[in-house]
């Protein structure tokens, strides 16, 4: 494959362009269960190449899946460059690259039959421990090779394996939905105990079938499981170098200032073992790294690709994200929050009246750039005198991450690993909850 | 092409198999403010092969076209032996051999990149002319697809699909007050249908500015007139998804709610899904498992009249095929989806509906929302207060919520001005987004709707 994209590069150079050719070859294998029954076994075989050119100092881009269409590809990239933005950067030359652990032979060799067995075990246990639940479950593994060459002499490739489980359980009770969702990053090794996994979900299901009344007001709140990500996601637009360049980030001019609670340390970790966003180099050949974004509450760094770094007179942080079908843009690699020292049991035990939020859905209705969030609590529980007493329904929690982030009551001692996000639970003392009275 | 596909499916030890191949060309032009963020072209050729036996599917999607398709078909079919069997079958379709070509006038490949770039730049400039506009997004996307379908029933179909669209959004700022408003246009009628939108683009900037001074809505119950855009979102999101048989057949609660014949509205109310409407965003001649699209009444004269099906759900529920099994691309196996979903028009005029509304809201578009079985929440784009039959003041942040079946019963007037909306967005389901769909309706009045603020 690397010979093929070098040919693309040479063809673009013959047209008077400096160029970068990127390719991805991957095989995804998955087994799926729908409504508790085995449904399908699928493979996705993907290959494609993207060509970015700088011609007459302007950027153009095109992509192709059929590598016999090299002429079309080069022609299209050069034509788009007639209209493209001026390039304020050069493609990077050869360099030294780190070697994050992102490949496991055990995942490469994992047979679909084994995924099927574990999925079947989980569903059998669910039917027993969560009567009436309808489970959609997918297990999937991807084995990929990424290659990048450019006119400055860069010529690099890496292999990567990723494996995950996605669980969506639905219980319908009194015409309301109880969604029990989970996601596991299994890239390190295909090891999970179905009994432990289902026991946890059964606990969530049991507590969700007891309704609890909650008056609108301000309460201590714990954002656990995927809800932690929903809250932190409010920071993502603000730390993106693109929004510094566009003068839209609320963090402009605030580097090295203490904006958050000292408990909060947050990394963009491009080298995390088996992180979904980990790689030796980013989408344009810059070495990936660990970038501290917030350090003990102090905002330290924005995240850049080459284009936004050039426009803001900074250096790329190795955060160019892309596929072969898209041009690079700055994005997260893996967002990792340093854990605190609270266990979930301790946190719950310390609350007199409050809310444990395990899943939230956003309406896409709030001003994300400003850090506002406003989410429906899709799976949440009322805590009374240190105990979970039942499900909170039809409730919303709203706020602004830059405001509530100034005072964090506590962080959990273990990370939920969602592949590209690793976060502990986050606890706040006093957040406004709206409920249907 | 078809001969290769035929050969690959021959002699497989399965109940049913099919292959879809898509050969697509796309162009994107994307401005953010004055910066051209992306201008690119892509060529995407690939396929999806499905085999069915003992109630299970094996699927391979691929774009490595150099390998042997025959080998892939055999490997895919062999994996079915891994899966525990169950007694489920598929509805069959007759043998066929049909080719459907796009009208050459609609072919965006005949338009130069310069013309495409010029169009979106010009529309973007209209928005940027207004000093209070802080930034914009202006996007042009087109795609031309040649799709081939071949099944083990000797059913061979070739069809071309064309999509062209623009999406324009203006963000306005006055001190710390930031508002945004946008619209999207485009169907399957080709590049020419996107010209002459200047008055519409002017209106977008005007509405965004209006939102800067609009009052926040006061919560309460209102009589509400919804515009065709919101009527479409309502038909699609709040009702249409409940009609999709894949969700229904797994959930007895939903089956009971959606039983054919159950009355949920007045005799005037009919809701339709129709994939055969040429020119609309959700139009296709055949769905992605080779079934012809058709007009399906979901509600007719107030009663549940039908459901949306794939070969598998139709067989399972003992109903007819509707041509609603669709995929966003060859990378996915098709699932039950809508096409063009709308409320049928009746006799009322907008003037009449507003005229006999004493105190209410005229509500336009939807910014987002969620549905959960019977309950829905939609936040509107903007609204007008209606007092004594007249629109008086612009209102923002109105959120409609309620029970879908109660709300259908509370529809007391249906307009004569059906409009179907397309644009660049689409429907998302099971990780497949955006699927091109159309939705719409006429203006519709609903009594006694709960309105909350955000």
Image (tube, rainbow, N blue to C red):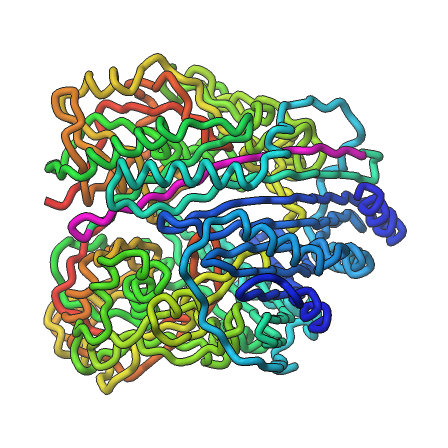
Left/right placement of residue B115 relative to residue B416 reads right
Left/right placement of residue B213 relative to residue B158 reads left
Residue B330 colored in magenta in the image: no
> Which residue is drawn at the image coordinates 37% and 40% (left, top)?
A123
Question: Is B256 or A338 nearer to us in this picture?
Answer: B256
Q: Is residue A188 above or below residue B378?
A: above
Q: Is residue B391 above or below residue A106?
A: below
Q: Position of residue A352 (x, y in %)?
A: 14, 21
Quadrant of the image occupied by residue A328:
top right
How many circles with numbers are drawn on the protein? Answer: 0
Left/right placement of residue B3 relative to residue B93 reads right
Q: Is residue A253 visible?
A: no
- Residue numbers of the magenta segment: A155-175
Q: Residue furthest top?
A: A341
Quadrant placement of the N terminus of chain B: bottom right
Secondary structure predominantly adopted by residues drawn in magenta = strand
Q: Position of residue A312 (x, y in %)?
A: 61, 34
Quadrant of the image occupied by residue B344:
bottom left
> Which residue is drawn at the image coordinates 47% and 47% (left, top)?
A32
Q: Is residue A246 above or below residue A83?
A: above
Q: Is residue B150 visible?
A: yes
Residue A157 colored in magenta in the image: yes
> Which residue is drawn at the image coordinates 33% and 48% (left, top)?
A363
Q: Position of residue A133 (x, y in %)?
A: 28, 45
Left/right placement of residue A256 relative to residue A307 reads left
Q: Position of residue B128 (x, y in %)?
A: 51, 58
Question: Is A286 or A275 nearer to us in this picture?
Answer: A275
Q: Residue furthest right?
A: A14
């Amino acid at each position: 494959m690397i010979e093929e994209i070098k040919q693309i590069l040479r063809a673009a150079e013959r047209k008077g362009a400096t160029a970068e050719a990127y390719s991805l070859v991957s095989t995804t294998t998955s087994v799926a269960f729908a409504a508790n029954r085995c449904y399908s076994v699928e493979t996705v075989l993907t290959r494609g190449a993207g060509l970015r050119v700088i011609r007459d100092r302007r950027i153009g881009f095109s992509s192709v899946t059929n590598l016999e269409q090299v002429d079309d590809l080069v022609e299209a990239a050069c034509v788009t460059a007639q209209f493209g933005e001026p390039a304020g950067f050069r493609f990077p030359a050869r360099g030294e690259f780190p070697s994050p652990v992102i490949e496991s032979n055990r995942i490469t060799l994992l047979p679909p039959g084994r995924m099927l067995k574990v999925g079947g075990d989980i569903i059998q246990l669910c039917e027993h421990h969560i009567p009436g639940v309808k489970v959609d479950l997918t297990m999937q593994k991807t084995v990929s090779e990424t290659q990048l060459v450019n006119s400055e002499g860069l010529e690099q490739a890496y292999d990567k394996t990723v494996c995950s489980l996605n669980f969506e359980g639905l219980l319908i009770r009194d015409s309301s939905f109880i969604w029990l969702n989970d996601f596991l990053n299994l890239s390190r090794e295909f090891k999970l105990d179905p009994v432990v996994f289902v026991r946890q979900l059964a606990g969530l299901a049991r507590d969700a079938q007891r309704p609890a009344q909650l008056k609108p007001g301000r309460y201590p709140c714990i954002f656990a499981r995927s809800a932690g990500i929903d809250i932190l996601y409010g920071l993502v637009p603000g730390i993106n170098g693109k929004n510094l360049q566009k003068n839209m980030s609320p963090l402009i001019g605030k580097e090295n200032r203490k904006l958050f609670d000292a408990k909060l340390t947050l990394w963009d970790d491009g080298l995390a073992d088996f992180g979904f966003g980990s790689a030796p180099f980013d989408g344009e050949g810059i070495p990936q790294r660990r970038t501290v974004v917030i350090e003990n509450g102090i905002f330290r760094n924005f995240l850049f690709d080459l284009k936004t770094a050039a426009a803001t007179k900074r250096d790329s942080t190795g955060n160019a994200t892309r596929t072969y079908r898209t041009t690079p843009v700055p994005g997260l690699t893996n967002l990792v929050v340093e854990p605190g020292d609270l266990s979930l049991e301790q946190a719950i035990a310390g609350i007199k009246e409050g809310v444990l939020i395990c899943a939230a859905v956003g309406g896409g209705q709030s001003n994300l750039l400003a850090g506002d969030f406003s989410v429906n609590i899709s799976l949440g529980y009322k805590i009374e005198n240190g105990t979970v007493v039942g499900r909170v329904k039809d409730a919303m929690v709203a706020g602004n991450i830059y405001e509530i982030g100034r005072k964090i009551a506590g962080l959990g001692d273990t990370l939920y690993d969602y592949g590209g996000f690793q976060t502990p639970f986050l606890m706040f003392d006093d957040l406004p909850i709206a409920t249907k009275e | 092409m078809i001969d290769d596909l035929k050969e690959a499916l021959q002699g497989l030890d399965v109940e049913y198999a099919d292959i879809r191949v898509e050969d697509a060309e796309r162009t994107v032009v994307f401005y953010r403010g004055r910066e051209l963020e992306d201008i690119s072209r892509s060529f995407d050729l690939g396929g999806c092969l499905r085999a069915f036996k003992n109630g299970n599917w094996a699927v391979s999607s691929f774009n490595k076209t150099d390998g042997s398709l025959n080998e892939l078909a055999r490997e895919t079919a062999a994996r079915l032996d891994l899966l525990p069997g169950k007694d489920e079958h598929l509805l069959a379709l007759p043998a066929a051999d049909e080719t459907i070509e796009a009208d050459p006038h609609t072919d965006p490949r005949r338009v130069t990149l310069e013309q495409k770039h010029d169009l979106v730049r010009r529309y973007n400039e209209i928005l940027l002319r207004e000093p209070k506009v802080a930034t914009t997004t202006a996007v042009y996307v087109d795609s031309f697809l040649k799709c081939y379908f071949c099944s083990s029933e000797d059913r061979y179909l070739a069809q071309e699909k064309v999509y062209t669209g623009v999406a324009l959004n203006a963000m306005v700022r006055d001190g710390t007050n930031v508002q945004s408003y946008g619209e999207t246009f485009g169907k399957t009628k080709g590049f020419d249908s996107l010209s002459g939108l200047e008055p519409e683009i002017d209106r977008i900037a005007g509405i965004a500015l209006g939102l800067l001074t609009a009052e926040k809505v006061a919560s309460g119950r209102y009589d509400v007139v919804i515009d065709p855009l919101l009527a479409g979102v309502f038909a699609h999101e709040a009702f249409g998804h409940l009609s999709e048989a894949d969700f229904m057949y797994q959930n007895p609660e939903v089956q009971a709610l959606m039983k054919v014949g159950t009355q949920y509205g007045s005799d005037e109310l009919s809701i339709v899904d129709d994939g055969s409407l040429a020119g609309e965003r959700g139009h296709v001649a055949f769905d992605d498992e080779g079934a012809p699209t058709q007009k399906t009444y979901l509600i007719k004269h107030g009663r549940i009249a039908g459901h949306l099906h794939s070969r598998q759900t139709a067989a399972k529920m003992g109903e007819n095929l509707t041509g609603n099994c669709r995929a966003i691309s060859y990378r996915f196996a098709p699932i039950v989806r809508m096409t063009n979903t709308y409320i049928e028009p009746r006799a009322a005029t907008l003037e009449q509906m507003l005229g006999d509304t004493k105190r209410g809201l005229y509500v336009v578009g939807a910014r987002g929302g969620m549905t959960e079985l019977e309950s829905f929440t939609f936040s509107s784009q903007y609204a007008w207060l209606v007092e004594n039959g007249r629109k008086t003041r612009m209102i923002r942040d109105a959120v409609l919520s309620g029970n879908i079946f109660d709300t259908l019963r509370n529809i007391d007037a249906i307009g004569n001005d059906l409009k179907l909306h397309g644009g660049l967005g689409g429907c998302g389901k099971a990780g497949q987004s955006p699927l091109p769909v159309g939705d719409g309706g006429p203006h519709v009045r609903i009594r006694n709707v709960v309105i909350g603020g955000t």
